[in-house]
Structures are given as structure tokens and as C-alpha cells.
Image: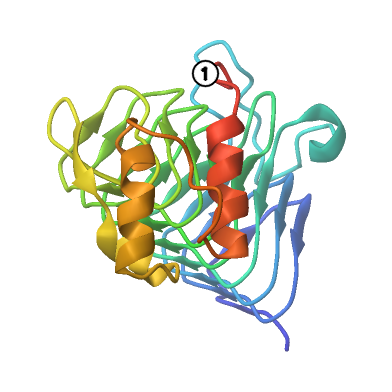
């Protein structure tokens, strides 16, 4: 299906759109940006403006696209498919890698995805979540309203972060984390059950979630097993 773009929206040079996207009034999207299919992008959204780097360039990107190729030079924005990006959200372009939003995410009103941030698939960012530059949010994470993540942060897969939290360091996979500074308070049992785990499997995985045991050898769905193994094997200095 064709894209539906409101006449007041500004789509700059270097923006590649897939099919069946909705782009609302007064939204500004500048290149280099690549957007997939079936996204709903609300009013007053800003995508692709320069990263908030005091010494970085600030071109008039809505008139001409910045030079360079995101694939080669590591900047720009890449957005997947079937995302819901609500009004007043901002997504900045990267400086050394493309800022990225995966598939099937729900980004609520007023959220900010800073430069060089990577948000994986099926992530929920509630209203006014702020992600500092170079942050990585893994798949299935859910960040509550007005959560703030320090630059270079890492939010593990399936983590639930309570509203108003200030995340200053890494948040573990499938934990429940709240407060200022944010601290893990338990296991995200609901999140694990939504990934197909029964009570026995949740109990078997819980020691690993709490940092007190190894990953179970079996009993996890294939997709979840792949995800948590990737988290377990990640470089600790990835940011």
C-alpha cells in the first residue's frame, strides 16, 4: 500500500520509505534515514536531526541530506517495520553507527532516542523516556514513564524498568528494576511467561536472572534461548 504523508510533514533528501507508512502533521524526517513498512509516525515527530554533540556538524538537513552513506560511515537512522512512534518523539542520527529502532516497537509520547542508540525489536518506551547516546535497549524490554537512561546504558532483554527510574548502569535481562538510582528488585515473571515459559521454566531461569547461577541447559524456547545466550555472551565493554 502507498504511504500516507500529511501535507505539512517535511521529508528531507536522503530519506528512504518503505510501504504503508503513516506520517502525521508537522513531522520532520531528514536523511540519511531508512524506514521500513507499516509504521505509524504521529504528529510533531522529529527523526534524523544531528546528534547532540557540541562539536558535531549541524547541517540544514531538511534542505539537503548530509554527505555520506549510513551503511559505510555509520551515521543516520534506520527504522524497521510496524512500529508505533507517538507524537513529539525525537530520534537523532548516529555519529559512529546508525541510530536504530527495530520492528514492532511502541514509542510513546515525548520519548527521546539519542544519537548512536540501538533499540531492538518489540521494545516499549512509555511517555517521556529519555535514552542517552550510545545506549542499547535489547528486545522485549519495557521502560516505564519518564525513565532516564545514562549515555552508554544497556537494558537487557525483557527487562521491566519502573516509571521515574534513573538508570546509571546496566539493567539485567528479565529483571524488574526501579528507583533512583535504579536497582533490580526481582524477576520479570510476566515477561518470561509472555515468552512462553511455564512456572517450572521460570523457576529454573530465575537464578541466572538474579546473577546467582548459569543458564539452564534446556527448557527454553529456541528464540528466547538464542536471545539470552547472546546477552550472556556480550562484551561487557560494548559501549
Looking at the image, residue 32 lies above or below residue 183: below
Is residue 133 or residue 110 the one in the foreground? 133
Is 113 situated left or right of 233 in this image?
left
Which quarter of the image is occupied by the C terminus? top right
Is residue 31 or residue 159 the one in the foreground? 159
Residue drawn at x 42%, y 60% as measured from the top left: 44
Q: In the picture, residue 214 is in which quadrant?
A: top left
Is 37 situated left or right of 27 in this image?
right
Rendered location of residue 21, percent (x, y): 63, 76
Residue drawn at x 44%, y 57% as measured from the top left: 140
Is 22 situated left or right of 43 in this image?
right
Residue drawn at x 81%, y 28% as measured from the top left: 73
Rendered location of residue 134, percent (x, y): 52, 27
Which quarter of the image is occupied by the N terminus? bottom right
Q: Secondary structure at mark 1?
A: loop
Looking at the image, residue 160 lies above or below residue 220: above
Is 31 situated left or right of 190 in this image?
right
- Name the residue that disc number 1 marks: 53
Rendered location of residue 202, percent (x, y): 34, 58
Amino acid at each position: 500500500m502507498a504511504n500516507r504523508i500529511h501535507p505539512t510533514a517535511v521529508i528531507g533528501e536522503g530519506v528512504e520509505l518503505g510501504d504503508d507508512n503513516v506520517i502525521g502533521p508537522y513531522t520532520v524526517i531528514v536523511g540519511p534515514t531508512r524506514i521500513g513498512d507499516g509504521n505509524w509516525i504521529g504528529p510533531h515527530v522529529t527523526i534524523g536531526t544531528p546528534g547532540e554533540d557540541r562539536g558535531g556538524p549541524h547541517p540544514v538537513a531538511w534542505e539537503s541530506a548530509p554527505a555520506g552513506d549510513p551503511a559505510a560511515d555509520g551515521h543516520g537512522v534506520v527504522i524497521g517495520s510496524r512500529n508505533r512512534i507517538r507524537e513529539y518523539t525525537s530520534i537523532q542520527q548516529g555519529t559512529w553507527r546508525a541510530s536504530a529502532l527495530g520492528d514492532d516497537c511502541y514509542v510513546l509520547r515525548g520519548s527521546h532516542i539519542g544519537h548512536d542508540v540501538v533499540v531492538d525489536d518489540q521494545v516499549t518506551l512509555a511517555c517521556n523516556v529519555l535514552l542517552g547516546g550510545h545506549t542499547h535497549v535489547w528486545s522485549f524490554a519495557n521502560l516505564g514513564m519518564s525513565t532516564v537512561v545514562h549515555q552508554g546504558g544497556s537494558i537487557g532483554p525483557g527487562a521491566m524498568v519502573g516509571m521515574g527510574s534513573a538508570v546509571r548502569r546496566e539493567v539485567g535481562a528479565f529483571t524488574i528494576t526501579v528507583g533512583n538510582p535504579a536497582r533490580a528488585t526481582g524477576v520479570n515473571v510476566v515477561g518470561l511467561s509472555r515468552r512462553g515459559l511455564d512456572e517450572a521454566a521460570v523457576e529454573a531461569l530465575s537464578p541466572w536472572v538474579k546473577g546467582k547461577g548459569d543458564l539452564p541447559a534446556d527448557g527454553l524456547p529456541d528464540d528466547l534461548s538464542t536471545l539470552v545466550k547472546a546477552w550472556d555472551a556480550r562484551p561487557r565493554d560494548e559501549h
